[in-house]
Image (cartoon, helix red, strand yellow):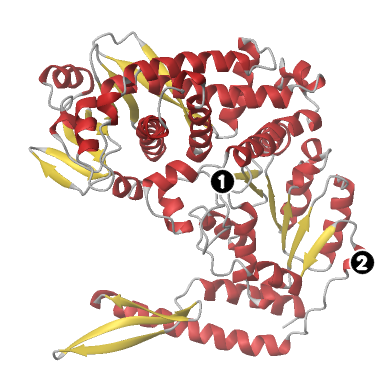
Amino acid sequence: MELSEMQARAAELEQQISALPAGSVTKKTVRGKDYFYHRWTENKKRREKFIPADELENFRTQIERRKALEQELKVLKKQLPKAKPANLSAFTTNVRTGEALRSFAASVRDYRRRECFRQLHDIVYGEPQDKVFILYGLRRTGKTTMIRQIFAEMSDTQLAKAAFIQITAKDTLADVNRDLKALEAQGFRYVFLDEVTLMEDFIEGAALFSDVFAACGMKIVLSGTDSLGFLFTEDEQLYDRCILLHTTFIPYREFESVLGIHGIDEYIRYGGTMSLGGVHYNETSTFASKESTDEYVDTAIARNIQHSLRCYQYEGHFRHLRDLYEKGELTSAINRVVEDINHRFTLEVLAQDWKSHDLGISASNLRRDRTNPTDILDRVDLAAVTDSLRKLLEIRNKAEQTVKLDDVHAAEIKEYLDLLDLTREVDVLHLPDVSTKSSRTVIAQPGLRYAQADALIRSLLLDETFSALSLTERTAVQQRILTEIKGRMLEDIVLLETKLANPKKQVFVLQFPVGEFDMVVFDPEAGSCRIFEIKHSEEAVPQQCRHLIDEQKCAQTEHRYGPITGKFVLYRGESQEIDGIQYQNVEEYLRNLA
């Protein structure tokens, strides 16, 4: 067997082995009955999993098959010459190979994996497709970590054929082309290029990666934070020769399973990035303060759009934003639009949501609180406080404007925020007036929205309008408003995640002349629907389902959207059924969305 055939066989064996279960089958006898388990070692810990009787024979066959392939690979490796380390001095760009990659991956070896990691894994180890794989998304959403996790699980043979190129702004496509040719000549098979859009000539020359190197069997993975740059590249250069994987949106179930953080309130406050989690990721949250949040909006969002504008040769995509860019005011304008979206959200909460809650119940609950009872809601005119805050907010909005934006500018910026997956629209429909339709903007990174709303309320409560209130009263008012904001944010989170998990169904808010269903999930194929109330409460009280049991609202809904197959209250308490209404824990609900 020639050397090239031996290397190809070794790679094939490694791929087959990775698809088979490791470890062994063990037997335990309990009260005279035999039970079989799969036992293996993972992260230096012994693991066991029960094997059903009807799967036992097939499982044993796979275990034995793996052992046979491992023995064949061991013999084959002894015949192969040891891989020579790459000559790094021959490269123009920053190329890492061999043991440098092992060190690069060491610290993330035990990190939990994002759900989208499987897609990256299958591309890297699957059959060549003459396509490049693009891993893109806003900062701190796990892109580079996933690449390092790929390196961490590579065998020695695979790692010897892998390279990681860290692109900088001084690199050019010619530099990268030269280094890729050198890597190809040395037998490298897996090449990852990080922050590839930093090259100013990337967008117009990106076809090089698919047409030359991927077409020759090399696995090319491009990653970076410039989401718009990648989208323009697909549109103008790569077409159907690339596979896109966007990492920006991180649903609650991943926030919980990957970071090890539990609780919907934690997700409301910090969700949206992979930068909180202590054991698994960084200790510092991106959205822990107003300053860090503003920095993220600036560097992860505003500069993303600016960079694409600077590097992209077809200015028609940016139309009216060109003037703002040339005057150095684009970043300010983008920040303004993001803040305005959140300010409008805060206004809606103060102007509408507050009215829909029973203040009497809240006052009673606060008076009976076991740890800190207070009669604050009996003594403070919350309606007047809210009205003052709302008026101040409108004034503050106008006073903070540093760039005069017209509707065209705002619409174009919003268009790009949608492309970045930062914002999504949820329909708001009406009955019986079906001709009325509106929408509400959901920020896909809840921590960003909460941090800005929290900072806004804190600053407003320091206004002289509230100087007559004591510290205790100001604190109580602030907490009450933030609780309302959390309640509205919980609605938005559930609506967004339900919509994304049900692409073939319609998910919307349904409003009536008085009251609304917080969420309706309409299945056009089945001709039926489910209706939901969403409450940021740990207690189940009759008031929560008053709309769900309203006969007129239900009759109008069934006339338009078919039979109602389920009525649900999503809340933070225990799952239970009360008088035909399904009370479901909202964390369980979000965790089970697929």
Residue at numbered disc 2: 89
> Where is residue 285 drawn, in percent x and y?
56, 49
Q: Which mark is residue 120?
A: none
Above or below, comparing residue 510 to residue 455 in the picture: above
Q: Quick check: 363 left or right of 281? A: left
> Where is residue 540 drawn, in percent x and y?
17, 40
Contact flag, marks 2 and 1 (Cβ < 8 Å): no
Report whether residue 526 is seen: no
> Where is residue 391 drawn, in percent x and y?
47, 13
Crowd tier of the residue under label 2, counting other residues whose Cα lies within 10 Å: few below 14, some 14–19, many 20 or above: few
The quarter of the picture where residue 466 lies is: top left
Q: Which mark is residue 247?
A: 1
Q: Amino acid at mark 2?
A: Ser
> Where is residue 526 drawn, in percent x and y?
23, 32
Q: CA distance from mark 2 to mark 1?
A: 34 Å
Q: Amino acid at mark 1?
A: Thr
Report whether residue 296 is seen: yes
Split into 4 quadrants, where in the image is the N terminus? Answer: bottom right
